[in-house]
């Protein structure tokens, strides 16, 4: 008990750790009140302060406060990843996730489990799926343990990938209503847009026009108004007249060239006679 108290006193007296904790408290307060600008300003300062801890990756030095420093750093990077989702910045998500990942792999045996680990791993899988980076998606899956694959956040991403590859787009869109974690909404909306763009691209090649009701069903919208907004924002070249959605105003097609069949037959017979003479 006395040894534990001494260790806690040492942690409290560490000026670097105290400074990081104070900055992080301000960051978390801004995060809770959804002040994304303040969070974005405080995050770089926190990352600079973390460079003073030699216990963090890639050094992993066994310092007196190593476990506490690793735990705080992991918490900071987890908040950084979640902030990138809130501000809808995929590049920041990728950077912060790669900075966080060693805490889930190399430092796993040194730290207690984090409740944010599986939701964030699931978010990363969704990001790869949205960006159509399927090979990396499966690479990340192979690195996960059997127990991790059974987690709802991971299973959700796996089932989405299977539905997407099978072309079961209705299952992909309906999965938006059953997300296992509140942070999944951003990437699910992006995935829904990807699905609708894929359907729209196929539809305008297959049809000259469709009724509004048929187009709404095909593009998996729940109302005509949602369809009209989608057309206005994403496909202004489409035209809606008297309840009909025209995909192309003028069907352009390249003129077909006539195949010179008689000439080809004569050439083939000529080649055949020449071959007979040679043989």
Image (cartoon, grey):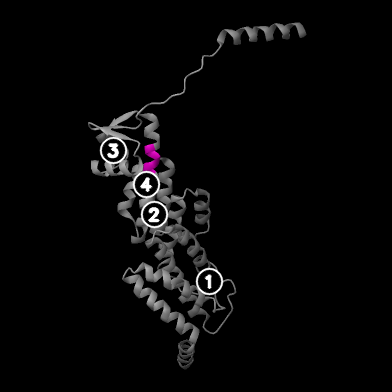
User: In the figure, is residue 187 to the left or right of 267?
Assistant: left
Sequence-wise first label, 4 or 2: 2
* Bounds of the magenta segment: 195-200
Q: Residue at x 43, y 80 (%)?
A: 21
Q: Which residue is mark 4?
A: 193
Q: Residues within 10 Å of mark 2 (few under 14, many from 20)?
A: many
User: Can residue 231 be seen here?
Assistant: yes
Give the CA distance from mark 3 to mark 1.
49 Å
Give the CA distance from mark 1 to mark 4.
37 Å
**Magenta highlight on residue 167:** no
Q: Which residue is mark 3?
A: 217
x and y percentages locating residue 47 in the rendered image: 49, 73
Sequence-wise first label, 2 or 1: 1
Give the CA distance from mark 2 to mark 1.
28 Å
Q: Residues within 10 Å of mark 3 (few under 14, many from 20)?
A: some
Sequence-wise first label, 1 or 4: 1
**Which numbered mark, 3 or 1, is in the foreground of this view?**
3
Q: Which residue is mark 2?
A: 187
Q: Which residue is mark 1?
A: 107
Asked if residue 199 is positioned above or below residue 127 in the image, the reply reads: above
x and y percentages locating residue 165 in the rendered image: 44, 43
Sequence-wise first label, 3 or 1: 1
x and y percentages locating residue 262 in the rendered image: 57, 7
Q: Residues within 10 Å of mark 4 (few under 14, many from 20)?
A: some
Give the CA distance from mark 4 to mark 3.
15 Å
Cβ atoms under marks 3 and 2 closer than 8 Å: no
């Amino acid at each position: 008990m006395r040894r534990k108290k001494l260790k806690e006193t040492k942690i409290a007296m560490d000026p670097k750790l105290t400074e990081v904790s104070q900055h992080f408290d301000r960051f978390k307060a801004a995060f809770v009140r959804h002040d994304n600008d303040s969070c974005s300003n405080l995050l770089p300062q926190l990352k600079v302060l973390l460079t003073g801890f030699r216990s963090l990756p890639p050094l992993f030095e066994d310092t007196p406060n190593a476990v506490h420093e690793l735990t705080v750093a992991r918490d900071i990077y987890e908040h950084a990843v979640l902030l990138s989702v809130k501000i809808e910045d995929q590049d920041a998500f990728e950077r912060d996730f790669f900075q966080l990942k060693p805490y889930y792999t190399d430092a796993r045996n040194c730290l207690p489990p984090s409740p944010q680990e599986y939701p964030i791993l699931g978010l990363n899988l969704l990001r790869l799926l949205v960006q159509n980076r399927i090979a990396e998606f499966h690479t990340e899956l192979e690195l996960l343990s059997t127990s991790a694959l059974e987690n709802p956040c991971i299973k959700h991403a796996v089932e989405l990938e299977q539905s997407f590859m099978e072309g079961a787009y209705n299952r992909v869109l309906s999965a938006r209503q059953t997300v296992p974690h509140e942070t999944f909404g951003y990437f699910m909306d992006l995935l829904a847009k990807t699905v609708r763009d894929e359907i729209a691209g196929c539809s305008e090649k297959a049809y000259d026009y469709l009724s509004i009701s048929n187009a709404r069903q095909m593009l998996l919208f729940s109302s005509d108004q949602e369809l009209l907004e989608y057309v206005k924002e994403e496909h202004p070249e489409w035209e809606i007249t008297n309840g009909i959605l025209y995909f192309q105003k003028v069907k352009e097609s390249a003129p077909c060239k006539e195949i010179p069949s008689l000439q080809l037959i004569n050439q083939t017979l000529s080649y055949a006679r020449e071959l007979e003479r040679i043989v």
